[in-house]
Image: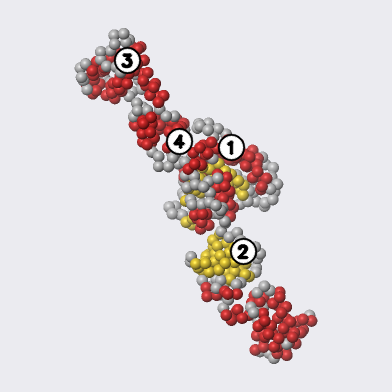
Amino acid sequence: MSNKRVSMRAIRDVLRLHFREGYSNRKIAKCLSVSASTVRAYLERAKYAGLSWPLPEDLDDHGLESRLYAEASVRHKSELGWEEVHREMSRSSMTLKLVWQSYRATYPDGYGYSRFCHLYRAWRHRTQVTMHLHHKAGEKLYVDFAGMTIKVRDQPKPAQVFVATMGFSSYTYAEATGDQTLRSFIGAHRRAFEFFGAVPAVVVPDNLKAAVKKAHRYDPEINPTYQEMCEHYDLVALLARARKPRDKVKVESAVKVVEQWILAALGTVPYLTLDMLNERIAKGLVTLNDTPFQKREGSRRSQFEAVDLPAMRPLPSKPFEYREWKVATVSFDYHVAVNKWFYSVPYRHDRRKVNVCVGEATVELYLGNQRIASHMLCPKAYGWSTHPEHMPSNHQEYTQQHRLLERAAQIGPNTEKVALTTIERRRHPEQGFHWGLLDLKRAYPGEHIEAACKWVLVH
């Protein structure tokens, strides 16, 4: 229908030619020099107004216009609010046609499907809401680190700021971390899920080193620990493409808002601790999430609670326990070096590559998918954790102290005392006692070894 109304006289001619002469819409349009769609539109208005030909004698042009356009006003009142339509569209598997069918079931004389779609798209364009990515309720969580850093007094390097925002509601979480390492990245995810009180279906990180083990334009390899975290929370990691900012425009916008609303307001004075900084960020998040939208109804919090949260999955019974995966080679002494500490595996696996899983309190070693060893994590450096059953039989023999002391006692009391002192100083005798003392018996008489041990004890 044309936006410009035709004269009342032309409308009378349309009614006359249609009802009295029986002309088709195309023929009427040709006679009156208007479009066929305009003819059809005014005939529909006449139908809704209950008008035919001849018109009542007392119906002047003003009355005719009121009758024709009064019904249009009723139809406008019968339409759904476009915010409500958009909210319905955010539901999983919802289409615009299903929304229109529900609308027509309530208002049988409402807009046709094509007009309904046109008006909805026009509303989307007018509101200037970023909707080129159609965000489903509770579906995607976008995460990234802000470019702005903050100095803290208890850390040598500036603190990094982790930001996470929901796709539909833009409900935002932020926290300061000491760095951008995998441990900090995973911990920030865990606290973000606890902040939201639920889990989305998809998490969209940038191509951070903490998330990506091997970058690729089309098929990047996700870090095993990050993948394990996703499996624990039953979600999918959808990595944003490199140099494709539109893939993560939601979190880019959230980062900008957090920097402007929260970080810029913190000033330049260094905070005493990271915890104090996070307390200030948490207060700023309350204000940010409760501030009403300018071009949408409600706020980030109200939209999240009304739309996102009902569509999200509940948190698992236990939070994810951080576990870092590495690949290492078993040395010839059947130990694997992990963070400068050595952990044993069964001796038959020496010189083979194994997968090392470093958890919060344990170290587990896998050959393929089979776990071959497990140890308590030692925070120290340069030491050994050895299970006797991992040793070959001839090495296990050395771990039996009474056997060792018996062999030393056969040489002499001083030799026995040196052997006992060596054993007591080491957790595992095979690591602290290299058996050169007992092996000397092959080359030297026992009395020479006994004299040497006496000299060691004296000096």
For the residues marked 3 and 2, what is the alpha-carbon distance in whole angstroms?
88 Å
Gap between marks 1 and 4 measured at Cα? 22 Å
Q: Name the side, left or right, on which 114 lies relative to 418.
A: left
- At x 31%, y 8%, the residue is 58
Q: Amino acid at mark 4?
A: Arg
| Kind of residue at badge 1 | Leu
Q: Residue at x 51, y 71 (%)?
A: 352
Q: Which element is circle 2 on?
A: loop
Going by the image, does 285 lie left or right of 99? right
Residue, disc 2: 377
First in sequence: mark 1 or mark 2? 1
Around disc 1, counting alpha carbons within 10 Å, would you say few (fewer than 14), some (14 to 19), or many (20 or more)? many
The residue under the point 68% across, 90% down is: 444
Q: Residue at x 52, y 67 (%)?
A: 371
Instruction: Specify the quadrant of the image occupied by residue 146.
Output: top right
Residue that mark 3 sits on: 7
Q: Are marks 1 and 4 in contact (CB under 8 Å)?
A: no
Could you say whether the residue bearing mark 3 is in a helix, strand or loop? loop
Task: Give the amino acid type for the residue marked by disc 2 in the picture.
Answer: Leu
Distance (Cα) linking label 4 and label 3:
40 Å
Instruction: Pick out the residue farthest to the top.
Output: 58
**In front: label 4 or label 3:** 4
